[in-house]
Structure formats: structure tokens, C-alpha cells
Amino acid sequence: MKIIVPDNLREGVLKPDIYDPTLNPLYRDVLAHYGAVAMPCRPADPDRKGKVESGVGHAQKTPLKGQRFESLEEAQDYLDKWEERWADTRIHGTTKRQVAAMFAEEKPALLPLPLEPFRYYQYGERTVHLDGCVEVEAAYYSAPPGWIGRRVSVQWDGKVVRLLDPKNGQLLREHRRGERGRHRIKEEDRPQRTPIGVVQLLARMATAGEHIGQLSKLMHAQQGEPAVRRIQGLLSITKKYGIARVEDACAAALELDLIDYRFVRNYLERNSQPPISLRQVDPLIRQLNLYRDLIAEKTKEEEPQS
């Protein structure tokens, strides 16, 4: 394991500290994959780090400026020749030493590359919901029992989702990626008894209305943990449509034996259009006396002359 001393770059160091810096977990894992440990330099003291910061800009401004290539292979061949004939033989502006000579000293310290490339992932923090799951890109993944209401660290890529203890980084659960709207729940994560938070939610729904409470209870009994979010959806739409209308929609769902949150939501949306009412006064409606005068005038014109 090798130690590197980088600058406090924002992508790698979340909180600079000479004694205990907080590192981006992705940055930390990339270094560990390649056998290195980062010891960021003292804040506001960049002279203590390596002289590599301007390498990308130097390559862009010197050999590549104004150049166009037909393929990546052609560009790589051009850069290889530029590096061999000019870059490696130049004198570094800060160290005043030849670049090739410095690299020859550092080369023996380089480690062999791992057999497999680093598997990039995204990361973040999530709160474990009442259904015992966390949400990642509109899909839901179970956490171990006892984590409801607590924060966990989450890592995910195109294949798996990992839940970790935020204090020590210990792996709590690993799931295969699921489709949007779907749940991934391991059997050992299913609670042996209904969590107190869910009991309180069902009691609240029963208080809201007889049919609302009955439908919520059946949803939880038939669908298990995934129903918790749908029950909360019922609670949410009572604020939009009112308890009375949601109660009627839940009664219709029970009568049709459709124990489904989406049916209730669609029922309310389709029956929420305001009735059409006729208006007594409108700028487009003329006053009745105008019609009376018009009729009287036309009738007078049509009377025969005596």
C-alpha cells in the first residue's frame, strides 16, 4: 500500500483537515483499488503536494492546440511521438530537472495494475422508510430489521445496490438492481410483527373514515411492506380531494374488490371535473330589452299601410 499526498481537491476531499480529513468514499475506494492511501496536504499549503496539477492543461495547450485527427489511434500515435521527442526531454519549469530523469526515479515505485478495472458507482445517504426500505432511483430496497427511521449510506451502479452502516462502512445489504416502482425485499428483512409506525398509520387511516381504514388494512394484509407507501398515498390525496370524496372512492374500490391505491386515485381524478353551469350574466349575452326593442321595430316595419 502506497501513500500519496494530493491537494484538497473538492472531488476527493469533502472536508479538509490536516489530522482527519473527510474523503469522498468513491475517491477513497478508487485509491484502495489501485493500492494507495490518500493523505491530503495541509490546507492552504499546496507546496507540500506533487507537481502534477497542470499536466492536463499543458497537454491541451502544447501538442493538441489547433490539431485535428481522423481517429483516436492517430491522435495517440501523435502524442506518443511528442512525448518521446519533446515532453520527456524538456526541463520542468518548477523542479528545473529533466522530466524523463525524474520519471526514471519514480518508475520502480509504481505498482502493477489490478487484473480488473475499478467498478464505478454512485453514492448517497437515505433514510429507511416505514416499509423498511430505502429509495434509489424510484426503486426500493430492504434494510435489516431495526433500521427504520435511521440513515444509511448507499452505493449503486448498473447491477447492484449496497446499503452500508454510515459509522463504520460495514455492508448491511446487497441487492440486485430493480425496476422503477419495484421492491427488493429479502426474506430475513420482513418484520415478524407489524412495526409500531405502521400500526399508528393504520389507526390514523381508520380514524379518517370507515372505508378508508378498511381499504388500508386490506392493502397491508395482502401486499405487505410495499403497501405502506400506498397507504400514505391515500392519506396524501385526502388533503387534495377531501375525506368525504376519498371515502366514497374507497367504498367503490371495496365494492368492486379492487384493493388498489391506483384505482382510488384514478377514480378521483376522473370524477373531479366541476359540473357545467349556465351563467345568467355574461358579456356575450345581450340584455333582454334589446331583443324586445328589435322585435317591436321589425314588427312595426311589417305592418301594412292603411
Image (cartoon, helix red, strand yellow):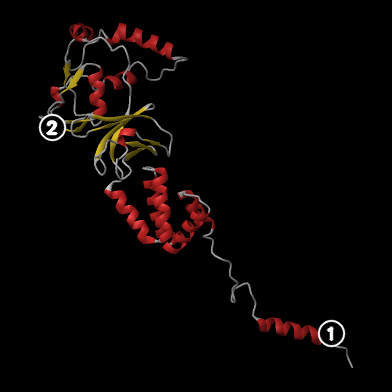
- The vertical placement of 153 against 118, above or below, is below
Q: Which residue position is annotated with label 2?
A: 17
Residue 211 in sight from this viewpoint:
yes
Q: At 45% from the left edge and 60% from the top edge, which residue is drawn? A: 247
Residue 233 in sight from this viewpoint:
no
Quarter location, residue 224: top left
- The vertical placement of 180 against 274, above or below, is above
Identified by mark 2, the residue type is Asp
Identified by mark 1, the residue type is Glu
> Is 27 positioned to the left or the right of 244 in the image?
left
Q: How many marks?
A: 2
> Is 25 positioned to the left or the right of 220 in the image?
left
Q: Could you say where residue 251 lies in the image, as x and y percent from the top left?
A: 48, 58
Within 10 Å of the Cα at label 2, are there few (<14), some (14-19), or many (20+) other Cα atoms?
some
- As helix, strand or loop, the secondary structure at mark 2 comes to loop
Q: Could you say where residue 266 lies in the image, as x and y percent from the top left?
A: 51, 52
The residue lying toward the viewer, choosing from 18 and 304, is 18
- The residue furthest bottom is 306
Q: Could you say where residue 45 lies in the image, as x and y percent from the top left?
A: 13, 28
